[in-house]
Amino acid sequence: MSPVTAWRPAVAGISEVLHARYVDHAYPMHTHDAWALLIVDAGAITYDLDKSGNHHGAIETAVTLLPPGVAHDGRSATPHGFRKRVLYLEPSVLDPALAGAAVDMPTLRDASLRDRVSALHAALAHPGDAFEAESRLAFVGERLRWHLRRRPPPGGGEAIGGLAAAFRELLDARTVTGVTLAHAAVVLHAHPTHLVRAFRRAYGLPPHAYLTGRRVDLARTLLLDGMRPAEAATAAGFYDQSHLTRHFRRFLATPPATYSRSIRSRVVSSRGV
């Protein structure tokens, strides 16, 4: 089995996702065109960054951010190797002008940020969860900018007015076709992270979760109408039947195929009475 898994997600701002498990591999000095956002899931990594010869470490409890165009290497800090997950971020997420700040402070000891990066990886593992991944990426990028610009997080008092309601109307109108967070921000004239915050405060859940719930409800209606699960998945806006099954089971504790069979068996039973 290959120690590396990599893919390019359908999420603007991320050029590559890489998951790797190494024992004795050592990276030579190299650079990237993109920002490398790294979390370690097991073990620890030591590396040198820039020509200054400064030694750094990437550990499980922190987030490591390596800027584009800056040379670095990497090797395991222990004989047992390490396991890591990396996102390569484009300039639309982080301005390359912030590279100097990242050289000075590549290790970010921020448990909330690490949790957000991990959750973003989980969303990126499923192609059908691109809207969730886009929302999570917006907040990861925002928090990285807070660190690099050394500014405190904004307060929680942004006025939401009718913004959340307008966003909900947009999601309701695009339940099947979907909408990107970037497009919603343009349509509603609001920053992506402000959109998500406003929606969560107004309705108690993030917009991607609301849209998923709407799609599950639509799929249930289609199944009740006699549509097959694979067809209902596509008709309700899911990526495929497995995507529907994963979320349908979360909501109803049963897969859509079983739900569909229970409908048919009840119909047959009632006809036989």
Image: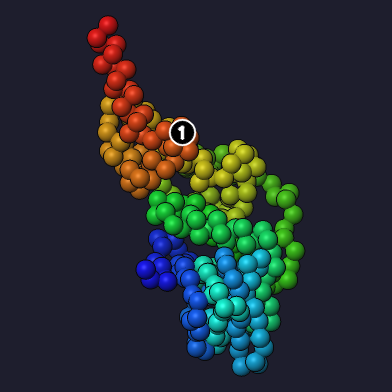
Residue lying furthest top in this view?
A: 273
Quadrant housing the N terminus: bottom left
Residue visible at 42% across and 43% down? Answer: 246
| Three-letter code for the amino acid on which mark 1 is drawn | Ala
Front position in the image: 33 or 44: 44
Residue visible at 59% across and 41% down? Answer: 205
Residue 163 rendering spot, x and y as whole percentages:
59, 44
Residue 122 rendering spot, x and y as whole percentages:
50, 56
Residue lying furthest front in this view?
A: 79
Q: Do we see residue 181 in this rendering?
A: no
- Disc 1 crowd rating (10 Å Cα; few below 14, some 14-19, many 20+) is few
Q: Quadrant of residue 113?
A: bottom right
SS for callout 1: loop
- 194 over 1 or under it: above or below: above
- Which colour assignment does the render follow? rainbow
Residue 155 rendering spot, x and y as whole percentages:
74, 54
Quadrant housing the C terminus: top left
Taking the image as shown, residue 115 lies to the left or right of residue 168, namely: right
User: In the rendered picture of this protein, how many numbered marks are placed on residues?
Assistant: 1
- 49 over 230 or under it: above or below: below
- 11 over 96 or under it: above or below: above
Residue visible at 33% across and 43% down? Answer: 241
Q: Do we see residue 160 in this rendering?
A: yes
Front position in the image: 12 or 259: 259
Residue, disc 1: 253
Residue 67 rendering spot, x and y as whole percentages:
57, 79
Residue visible at 50% across and 60% down? Answer: 121
